[in-house]
Amino acid sequence: MNPTADFVPGLQGVVAAQTRLSSVDGLAGELIIAGFPLEELALNATFEETVYLLWNDALPTASQLADFRASLAAYRAIPPQTIDLLRAAAEQKLDVMDALRMAASTITLRSADEPQHDQRDSLALVARFPTIIAAYWRLLQRQEPVAPRMDLSHATNYLYMLTGEEPSAERTRGLETYLNTVTDHGLNASTFTARVIISTGSDMVSAITGAIGSLKGPLHGGAPGPALDMVFEIGEAANTEPVLRQKLESGERLMGFGHRVYKVRDPRADVLAQAAERMYKADGDMQLYNLAKHVEQTAVRLLEAYKPGRNLQTNVEFYTALLLHGLDLPTDLFSPTFAISRVAGWIAHCEEQRAVGRIIRPESIYMGEKNRRWQPINQR
Ligand code: ACO
């Protein structure tokens, strides 16, 4: 290895890709997605427009959007083999992210009349994540899956497949704001994972399956469930400070706070806080919303007291939890719903990485022993 290379724990500050997909400015608290400030995109776009933008670097015209929506919708249905696999997973009550990882792999099962190319796999991945997750969730509840509808938007259809009922326009808008907000975010761990896999010349489904595994971890996409559990555990405003102090004193991390890149408030937290407030005001539990706001303010104050100078601020997961709970999604579906959005960003990054055409292959520093001598097994 190059003896002058420094070991950078967690690769913090290391630049490993060039991208046109998103720009994360952790000091200014600014997120740009394909040229648009987050606030502009999150509040205006449908999710299909956001996916089109990421994949084509331009907003679609009305007819391009109609075509794109139709081609995505055409891939929504999942084959019986995938449903059988989900049934087996539900028997064992596997975690939803594990079931998603298993079922995503089956996207390489193509029927004879389907095109055998990557564009088909990319469309099928985005189109089928909601179907897989909703079907699996219903099987876990001992209910039969609800077949996808081709006439509904991506977000509406997901909520429809979970309950069998069409959601209100506010709910669809709340979900769409969320999906737009988390679809891409620089070289986060799961995106990096996908880029590493595709850089070897591997295929899209393999790259996305690996990315699901990376997103699942609690230090990445697995935090919103625990963030909401923490608000419920606190229960009422008066308990906030003692509960949070006790957690910090026992060395626990407060879920929904801190970020590798953002040293100010995560801009996604603001967009999602506004969307959550609108939804809760329209039809939700304002007491819970107000408690969450109080927990957030107290947590930020206490984190500064217990971890001075670390700049631990609210991250995207905190208001994700509140928004998705307001949509009646159970906590077990929070990370999978994140994946429904992020898969579009993963695919766009994979295409960028392919164009680079170079394998990602960093180095390691050997810390072990040298000059060991072989001992026959009976002498060990
Ligand atoms: N609560 C309490 N202390 C914290 C927290 C937290 N949420 N986050 C960081 N710290 C402390 C660490 O204990 C450490 O303190 P020390 O130096 O005294 O030991 C210091 O702050 C720095 O922490 P690192 O782990 O080095 O920070 P890193 O940049 O590696 O981690 C991370 C970022 C993983 C997000 C971290 O802040 C964390 O664990 N947060 C809670 C989990 C969470 O909310 N995850 C979702 C992140 S958003 C996303 O990925 C989409």
Image (cartoon, rainbow, N blue to C red):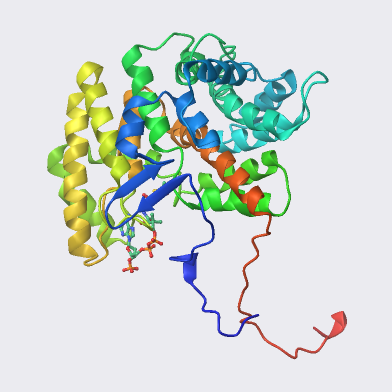
Q: Report x, y in % for residue 352.
A: 59, 47
Name the quadrant of the C terminus: bottom right
Query: Relative to the observer, which residue lies in front, 20 or 3?
Result: 20
Query: Relative to the observer, which residue lies in front, 30 or 287?
Result: 30
Residue placed at 38% from the left, 51% from the top?
A: 24
Residue 355 visible in the displayed image: yes
Ligand 1: image quarter: bottom left
Judge left or right: residue 131 versus residue 251.
right
Query: Relative to the observer, which residue lies in front, 160 or 111?
Result: 111
Residue 230 visible in the displayed image: no
Q: Quadrant of residue 322?
A: top left
Q: Report x, y in % for residue 32.
A: 37, 44
Query: Relative to the observer, which residue lies in front, 34 or 165?
Result: 34
Q: Report x, y in % for residue 191.
A: 54, 48
Judge left or right: residue 268 versus residue 223.
left
Q: Report x, y in % for residue 208.
A: 62, 41
Q: Is residue 38 above or below residue 356?
A: above
Q: Is residue 311 above or below residue 167?
A: below
* Number of numbered markers: 0
Q: Is residue 255 above or below residue 5?
A: above
Name the quadrant of the N terminus: bottom right
Judge left or right: residue 44 versus residue 89.
left
Q: Is residue 26 above or below residue 279?
A: below
Q: Residue furthest left?
A: 238
Residue placed at 40% from the left, 41% from the top?
A: 35
